[in-house]
Amino acid sequence: MDIEEDGSCMQMDTDDLITNGDISESMGKLIIDESSSSTFKKKPVIIFLVGMEGSGKTTFLRRLVCYTQAWNISGYVINLDPAVTNLPFGANIDIRDTVRYKEVMKQYNIRANSAILTSFNLFATKFDEVISAIKNRADQLDYVLVDTPGQIDIFTLSASGAIITEAFASTFPTVVTYVVDTPRSQSPTTFINNMLYACSILNKTGLPLVLAFNKTDVAQHQFAFQWMKDFEVFRAALASENSYTSNLTQSLSLFLEEFYKNLRTVGVSAVSGAGIDGFFQTINASANEYLEIYRSDLDKGQIEKPRLVDERCKEYMDKLRKEMEKTKGDMVALSTSLKDREGNTMNMSVKECVEGDDDFFGRYTDDEEFTDGDEDGDEDEALASFCT
Ligand SMILES: Nc1nc2c(ncn2[C@@H]2O[C@H](COP(=O)(O)OP(=O)(O)OP(=O)(O)O)[C@@H](O)[C@H]2O)c(=O)[nH]1
């Protein structure tokens, strides 16, 4: 089935081009007014998975999906990575149903990373629809699991990443999980690079942060806990690395001591399933922290209400426009059709959040051919075998 002829949800269509004005309108919808505190929901808990490329975010998310299914916990899955070719779980909302980054690349003759960023920006302009879809189901959901782009900066440093994070954080308890590749982090320099990233995310979002040391089936994580607890142990490990940046790494570790003190950490294996119970306990504790600290500060006005502040929103819009101009994507657009996936983690109605004309549902496979939803059966089988 050819998506271009079919006219289905993922098609890039010049009739659907949106202008900056349209973006503003869409962004305007994201502005939560003074009465918004009444729209705040205590559940579901939003779990953002971020981390370096290859740290295992997608595999970990799949493990979490298996866990929620096994324990009858109601989860909802969102994929925000426009470039992922093969998603090993069914996403209820998938950015790829809204925008094809390869089309953006072709149409605007831009490189892959720019196209991914542009696609992400475009999706952010429609994020109010995602928030509404989840709000409508809030009573039935416990967790929303969000996979983010492999290129960590696209999510953590872009204006759209901030828009998406804040849209969630002003409506639901929200926790960021930074997934660490434990075997790789056995190198003190790689470890510190990860900690710096995690620290900057904490600094930027102000949200509770959980460090999930993944791949513990390959390397246990206790060394990392030791390094965070005792600088001398870290220094000894660094001495054996003999790196020309070791003085800097050493200073950075000292600098991070305060950050380590306020962190929640857990060791997990996305492959074996080890540590997942502990992970959810940590998430629940972090969600309570969100309610006790972040939310109450927000309500008391001690921290800036993200979308109550016109200026801040305007600043985002300007940044977003600049990014889109840079990537020549300021006039790109798409027909959105955020679709729930029937028969996946939730048996929800597709209709409510579909802005489209039919029940058509499709997927890009590895070879970029569009297929209909018939592979769901296979996916369920694969999921079942993975979950054992
Ligand atoms: N041994 C082991 N391998 C894992 C684990 N989690 C992920 N992997 C492997 O690590 C590789 C990367 O995993 P992904 O889930 O694709 O990582 P990602 O962070 O989503 O990757 P990007 O989307 O590129 O950022 C794959 O080969 C996985 O099979 C784990 O817990 N143990």
Image: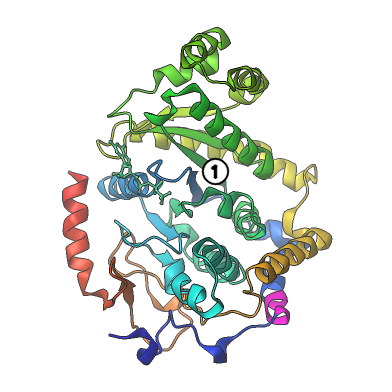
Taking the magenta stretch, the answer to whether it contains residue 5 is no
Residue 46 screen position, x and y as percent:
51, 50
Residue for point 73% across, 81% down: 21
Q: Which residue is mark 1?
A: 175
Name above or below for residue 165 compared with residue 9: above
**Picture quadrant where residue 96 is located:** bottom left
Query: In the image, what residue type sits under mark 1?
Result: Val
**Residue 113 or residue 255, whichever sits in front:** 113
Name above or below for residue 171 compared with residue 7: above
Residue for point 21% across, 46% down: 387
Residue 182 screen position, x and y as percent:
40, 29
What scheme was used to colour the molecule?
A: rainbow
Residue for point 67% across, 67% down: 326
Residue 149 screen position, x and y as percent:
48, 55
**Residue 32 or residue 80, whichever sits in front:** 80
Q: Residues within 10 Å of mark 1 (few under 14, many from 20)?
A: many
**Residue 207 or residue 372, whichever sits in front:** 372
Task: Look at the numbered disc 1 and give the secondary structure of its residue.
Answer: strand
Prevailing SS of the magenta stretch = helix
Taking the magenta stretch, the answer to whether it contains residue 23 is yes
Of the 4 image quadrants, the one containing the C terminus is top left
Q: Which residues are magenta?
A: 20-25
For this view, does 71 lie left or right of residue 212? Answer: left
Of the 4 image quadrants, the one containing the N terminus is bottom left
Residue 375 screen position, x and y as percent:
21, 70
Residue for point 40% across, 58% down: 77
Ligand 1 picture quarter: top left
For this view, does 165 lie left or right of residue 268? Answer: right
